[in-house]
Image (cartoon, rainbow, N blue to C red):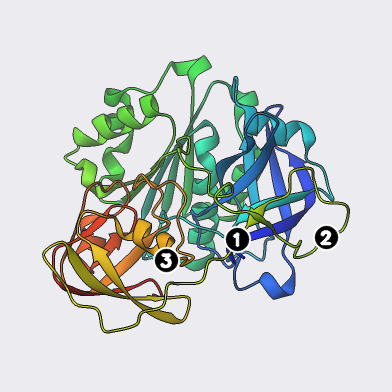
Amino acid sequence: MNARVHELVVREVVSETSEAVSLIFDVPVELSRRFAYSPGQFLTVRVPSEQTGSVARCYSLSSSPHCGERPAVTVKRTLGGYASNWLCDNVSAGSVLTVLEPAGNFAPRNWNRDLLLCAAGSGITPIMSILKSALAMGRGKVVVLYANRDRQSIIFARQLQELIRRNPRRLSVLHWLESERGLPDARGIATWARPYRKYDVYLCGPAGFASAIKDGLARLRIPERAIRQEEYRSLTDNPFERHAAVVTPAHAVGPPQAGAGVAVAVAPAPVAAPLRASADTATVKVEIDGETHTLPWPRTKKLLDVLLDHGIDAPYVCRESACGTCVCRVERGRTRMLMNESLIDEELAMGLTLACQTLPESDDLHIAFDQ
């Protein structure tokens, strides 16, 4: 059984705007360690579909693990968006949703740094988690730029106002409303952000907004590689549909929703003799979930695919380098990534890599997921 798939009860549904709701989850004690999360991470939710069995969508956690809040994701309706509309229309208190454990790599490393947080629309969701955590855990200043169509579209409007009231010397928020000043543009961003050009930048929003932010900050000589960005994209692979055995609900207040999650466990292939590297295959020792596996690693095969083929329950969501879920550390040997959209230079220097994009360059390697 896939240990990363669970069913959680929705404790409460909070209407944030006419288009957005927050789903607050009950996490039973026995799953508390598995659902410990970092600000900026997300949950992958299974939404039933008559056409495909299910679709998988990632929703950022808007709650903060440092503020005594229950885990919550915030979902905004999108035009033609099947999953977001289904969740907004069908989920209520007592509903059971199938989810993967928290994942993602969008959290600040140092809470005492000054932060510039830029969001548009539902991009405020992970930014809100980071904002609340920074005010609770750190000593630095926090500046938020939040773009929306109009005042009625502002998600967390009251919460933001309350945070400003409680932290007047540390927090400032600029609401950039399209109805009042048009779309954000590079010149306006550069003029506004000049006092904050030494701050650490975190960005989440649609492509047009992200481009305007990057272009504006580039005018202040802030390079794109210094900006941490969280991207929303459709998954090309459904992590729930890889499995075949029904997951037993971890905790249920009412009957499960239709289309419960499924999972299967495959025993790792036994190794009869010590593995040797060859021209076509390297050897890798992998530490994951408290266990160590020694495996042949074909030089043209990504590490994540090798692990899944051996029945090892490696974490992943997007398989496209964007989410950071499959991050691991190279303890010995050399690897190379085909793509990298989530790790910054500092993390690469620490030996971090993405299993979904990593190929071996050495004959003998040691990879650790347990960091």
Image quadrant occupied by the N terminus? bottom right
Pointer 3 residue: 310
Q: Earlier in the sequence, mark 3 or mark 1?
A: 1
Nearer to the camera, 187 or 45:
45
Disc ID at residue 264: 1
Nearer to the camera, 88 or 259:
259
Which residue: 28% across, 30% down? 191
Label 3's element?
A: loop
Mark 2, other Cα within 10 Å: few <14 / some 14–19 / many ≥20: some
Which residue: 26% across, 38% down? 194
Disc ID at residue 252: 2
Q: Are marks 3 and 1 in contact (CB under 8 Å)?
A: no
Marks 3/2: CA–CA distance:
32 Å
Q: Is residue 103 left or right of residue 240?
A: left
Which residue: 44% across, 81% down? 291
Q: Earlier in the sequence, mark 2 or mark 1?
A: 2
Q: Label 2 amino acid? A: Ala
Marks 3/1: CA–CA distance:
13 Å
Nearer to the camera, 194 or 52:
52
Q: Position of residue 300 (x, y in %)?
A: 21, 54
Image quadrant occupied by the C terminus? bottom left
Q: Label 3 amino acid? A: His
Q: Position of residue 297 (x, y in %)?
A: 26, 65
Q: Position of residue 205 (x, y in %)?
A: 44, 34
- The tally of labels here is 3
Mark 3, other Cα within 10 Å: few <14 / some 14–19 / many ≥20: some
Residue 20 placement: quadrant: top right
Q: Is residue 134 above or below residue 176?
A: below
Question: Visible in this render: residue 98?
Answer: yes
Q: Is residue 116 above or below residue 330?
A: above
Question: Visible in this render: residue 113?
Answer: no
Spot the residue most to the bottom: 273
